[in-house]
Image (cartoon, rainbow, N blue to C red):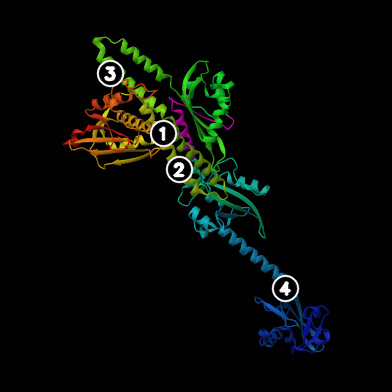
Amino acid sequence: MVMIDRTGKIVMANAQAEPVFGYSRAELVGQPVEMLVPERFRGHHPELRKTFLADPRPRRMGAGRDLFGLKKDGSEFPVEIGLNPIETDEGTMVLSAIVDITERKATELALRESERRFRLVVEAAPNSIVMIDRAGTIVMVNTRAERAFGYSRAELVGQPVEMLVPERFRSRHPELRKTFFADPEPRPMGAGRDLYGLKKDGSEFPIEIGLVPIETEEGTMVLSAIVDITARKAAELALRESERRYTVMVDGVTDYAIYMIDPNGIVTNWNRGAQRIKGYRTEEIVGRHFSCFYTEEDRTANVPQQSLEIAARDGRYEADASRVRKDGSRFLANVVIDALRDDEGQLIGFAKITRDVSERVRAARELEEARIGLVRSRAEEALRRAEAELARVARVTTLGELTASIAHEVNQPLAGVMNSANACLNWLASGPPNIEKARKSADRIIKDSERASEIIRRIRVLATNARIQKAPLDVNIVINEVIPLVQQELIGDRVSLRTELTPALPLILADRVQLQQVIINLVMNGIEAMQPVTDQPRELVIRSQLEEARQVLVTVEDSGVGISTEDMDRLFDAFFTTKSSGVGMGLAICRSIIEAHGGRISAANNTGPGASFRFSLPLHQADAS
C-alpha cells in the first residue's frame, strides 16, 4: 500500500511495500511517487494523477494497459494497481493497492507458449486433427483436416462433428460420443469396425481414428487423430488379390506336385498336382513330415534329411528316385528341392517340386509295342500317332531334364512374391505406415505373380499332347522364349550363351511348340557336346538370318568336341546315339518336325572347335510375296 497526496508525494507506505520495491519506509515517505515508476512512463504520470483527482472514485489504474513498478535496484516488475480516494484532514489522498503479478504473468506466458506449441504440434501432425467439445461441436481443426475433408477451417469450426460422418452412421454417433465422455481414456475409435469419413463433395473414404481427452478451461474436449487409410486399404486388397492369384496359379498345376516344407521338413501347403500324384488330400498331409513319401530303404538310409542338408548347403537338391504314394504304390519321380531364405539370408523353408516320370518309361515301351504290332493297312496312321506321342514324350523328357531350370525360373518370382509381401507388411506396420513403399511392394507382387503364371503356362503347353497348330511366327521370339528354360543347364555346365539374331525377320508358318522342341533339343545337344572340354571356354551361339532362297535359317553352334566322320551320316537316323544313356530319337524327331514344315536340317563341324546344327524354314506366304 502506498498513499500519496495531491502533489504526488508519498505520505505512507506499508511494510509489504518495502520488500516489493526494495526501499525502506524512511526512503519512501516524502519522495515523489514517480520514483517507483519506470522512466519511460514517468512523464505521463503527473497528468494521469491529475485526471484521477479530478474525478476521485475507486477504480483500476491503467485499464487495458500493462503497468510496471520500478525497484530500487533499477529492475522492473509487472503490477496491477487499484486506486482509492481517501479524505483526510490534509485533503484528498490517493491510496494505491499495488499487486506484484510477476508470477501470474510468467504463468500466463507459459500457458500461451504451451498453447502455441500445442497448436504447432497439431498443425504439424501428419494426420488430420479435429477437436470437439462435449456437445460434439468442432472447436479446432488442422490444415490436413481441411485437405482430407475438403472444407475450409471456417466451414468446420462451430459445426457439429456429424457433418463429417456418413449418413448411415450419423444417428449412432452422439451415443458413442456420450459413451466416450463417460470414460474419457485415450483409445482407438470403432475397434473391430470399418470407419469412414464424409468429404464435402459427398464421397466417403476409409479412416482410422484415435481419441484423446484434453482438459481445457472450457472443460473436457476430445482430440481426434484421423488417418486416411485409402492407400493402405488398396495395398491390402492388392496383396490379398496377389496371394489369391498365386494360390490359384500353383494349385492349378496338376502335372507337378508343388508344395512347401519348413526347415524341419514339415509340409506347410499342398497343391492339386501333389494330391493327384501322391494321393493325399491337403488336410491329410499338411503338418506331417515329408519323409512319408520316401521308401523304407531311403528312410533307413536317412535320405530325406540328407536331401534337405544338401539343399540348404548348395541352394538346390535334385534326384530321380522311387517315391511312395498314399496307397503304398511306388512311382519314378524327378525331385527338385530349393532352399528359401529371407532378406537376411536366414533359412525359412524349402520349395519342393516332384514330377512323376514313370510315363516316360511307359510311353517308350508302348511305342515299341505299337511298332511291333503295326499291320500294313494301318502302318502310316499308327506311325504318325506313335511319332506324335514320342515327340510329346521327348518334350516331357526334356522338361524333366530341365526341372532345375524350370524350378529356378518359377521360384524366382515366387521368392519375389514372398519378399515383397513381407516388405509390404513391414511398411504398413511402421509408424506411420509408409503407404508409397507398401504400394510399390504390392506392384512388385503383382508383376512377379504374372511372371510365374506365364512360365507355368509355357511349361504346360510344352507338356501337352496338343494337335499341330501352325501359325505365323517370328523365329526370334521363339528363340527368346526357349532361353529361360535352359538357363540353369547353361549355368550348371559353365556355358556362356550368345545370340546373334537378325532383327525384323519375315514370319514363318510353323507350330510354336514343335519349333521350341527342336531348338531346346539342339541347345541341349550343344551343352552335352561341350562337357568334355576343359582347356578352352565353352560357348554356345544361336543365330538367325534370312537366306537368299527366301528362307529363315537358324544355327546352333557349340565349341565342343565336334562330330566324327563315321557318325556324321547317321546323326539324324532313328535310334542312333553316341550317348551312353540316350535312346537316339532326339535328332530324328527334330528332322521329322523340320521336314514336316517344308524345311531342312543339317550338321557340320566348325572351322575351329565344335559343330553347328542348322535348320531352315520357308517364309509365310504373305511375307514371301
Label 2 residue SS: helix
Q: Report x, y in % for residue 73.
A: 75, 82
| Pointer 2 with pointer 4, Cβ within 8 A | no
Badge 2 is on which residue? Answer: 444
Label 3 residue SS: helix
Amino acid at circle 4: Thr
Q: Between tags 2 and 1, which lies in front?
A: 1
Q: Earlier in the sequence, mark 4 or mark 1?
A: 4
Badge 4 is on which residue? Answer: 102
Label 4 residue SS: helix
Q: Residues within 10 Å of mark 1 (few under 14, many from 20)?
A: many
| CA separation in Å, label 3 and label 2 | 46 Å
Q: Between tags 3 and 2, which lies in front?
A: 3
Q: Is residue 243 magenta?
A: yes
Amino acid at circle 3: Arg
Amino acid at circle 2: Arg
Q: Is residue 578 above or below residue 176?
A: above
Left or right: residue 402 compared with residue 514: right
